[in-house]
Amino acid sequence: MSQRVSGQTYRADSGRAVRPQPGPKGGPRADYTLVHAGRQVRLGPLTFWIAVGSLVIMAGWSLATGTYFAFHDDVLTRLIARQKEQQFAYEDRIAELRIQVDRIASRQLLDQEQFEQKLQQIVRRQAALESRASTLAGVADPTPTGSIRRPAPLSDPGKSETIKPSPISDTVTFTAPPDREARLESRELPAVVQRAAMSAPSTAAGVEGMLARLQTSLDHVEARQTATLNSLEERYDFKSKRIRGVLTDLGMDSKKLPSGVQVAAVGGPFVPVTLRKDAGAFERQLYRIYVARASLERLNRTLTTVPVRKPILGEIDLSSGFGVRTDPFNGRPAMHTGLDFRSSMGDPVRVTADGTVESAGWNGGYGKMVEVDHGNGFSTRYGHLSEIDVKVGQKVQIGQTVGHVGSTGRSTGPHLHYETRIAGEAVDPQKFLRAGLRLGNAL
């Protein structure tokens, strides 16, 4: 086979020459002639290059196919390995995202549980404080049993008289418990807690801030209750010490004295108050307050039988004291067994302690006299009365009118002769009146 390009001849077969063909103008013609076995095939340039291109493509394809089959396993292995790597990376990413989601969910669940636990603690604490407030409401200052409100003084219709109040309190005054504000504040907390639970913030900072505010509010309530307990305990101890001191100065042992007479109808089985071993600070302090209050009530009941109050309202105006004096009738030295209170005719005379009327009527130089037995060896006498308002055997209470100022018996003018006796022996009433002044608001 031979090939001729631009008048040149190339051999491509068994060695036979390929003769170039003359061109249209006598020059060589640009065509291709293939000679094989005596046969000639004439090809044009386009056909020739198509054939050459096809052969090149086929050779390339054959080379690629051979290479593919030669390295088929390696390529497949690499592709599979790459695919697995991508799959593993994807699965790792999915697992990591899942872990993050689980971590976030667990954190939210933990935060929610912690919030609920803290909220439950706040609710329980609030309920405990509310219960404490109810308990404190029942712990009030004891007042002397048998005390009555002092009636208005009697005076002449046409006479204007100003009577100053006594420094000794003979009235029963009821005041609101000092923990009222704390109880009102604690009762508002359930609504606050409920609103907080229904509208809990989504952020941790908001939740912690809200819980902190609730805790602070409860701390304020608890502090107020603690202050109330401390105030009650100090008040009871102070009053008890003052009363014991006064009774001791009067020569009485408060531990050996009976607790006085109960006026109200009360009773029931005795159930002692005990303190649990696991009691907290609040319960222990409350127990001490109960003990102190019971002691103060006993002292108050005892004090109702001790004549430490004034028999006449207003300022004390003594016309004669206790002890030896010159008798106003004969001018000789005589023992004056009481106090003479200068007063107006008809002014009310009031009993100075609870007791029972032992005598009521005319008694020699006393004129019209009332004697009251207060128990514990105490008795008082009210002499020179113009009128007597009680009867023998009648029970009288502090401040109750037993008669009116007069000038009956051995008297030079309207006044009250007042005596204080212990075991039948007259003692200076001023000692008891000064004790009453010392007691002040403890009465």
Image: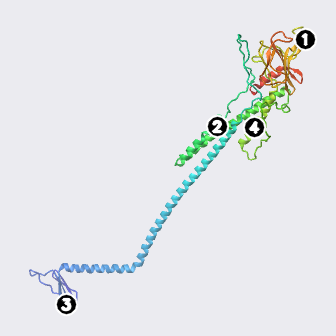
Percent x, y of residue 36: 20, 89
Toward the top, the furthest residue is 330
Q: Quadrant of the C terminus?
A: top right
- Cα separation between marks 3 and 4: 142 Å
Kindly identify which residue carries mark 1: 333
**Mark closer to the observer (3, 4):** 4
SS category of the residue bearing label 2: helix
Chain-order first, disc 4 or disc 1: 4
Against 285, is 338 above or below?
above
Residue 213 can be seen in this image: no
Depth check, front residue: 181 or 281: 181
- Cα separation between marks 1 and 2: 66 Å
The amino acid pointed to by label 3 is: Arg
Chain-order first, disc 3 or disc 1: 3
The amino acid pointed to by label 2 is: Arg
The amino acid pointed to by label 1 is: Pro
Kindly identify which residue carries mark 2: 183
Name which residue lies at 19% across and 90% down.
Answer: 16
SS category of the residue bearing label 1: strand
Kindly identify which residue carries mark 3: 16
The circle drawn on residue 290 is 4
Depth check, front residue: 124 or 146: 146
**Mark closer to the observer (4, 1):** 4
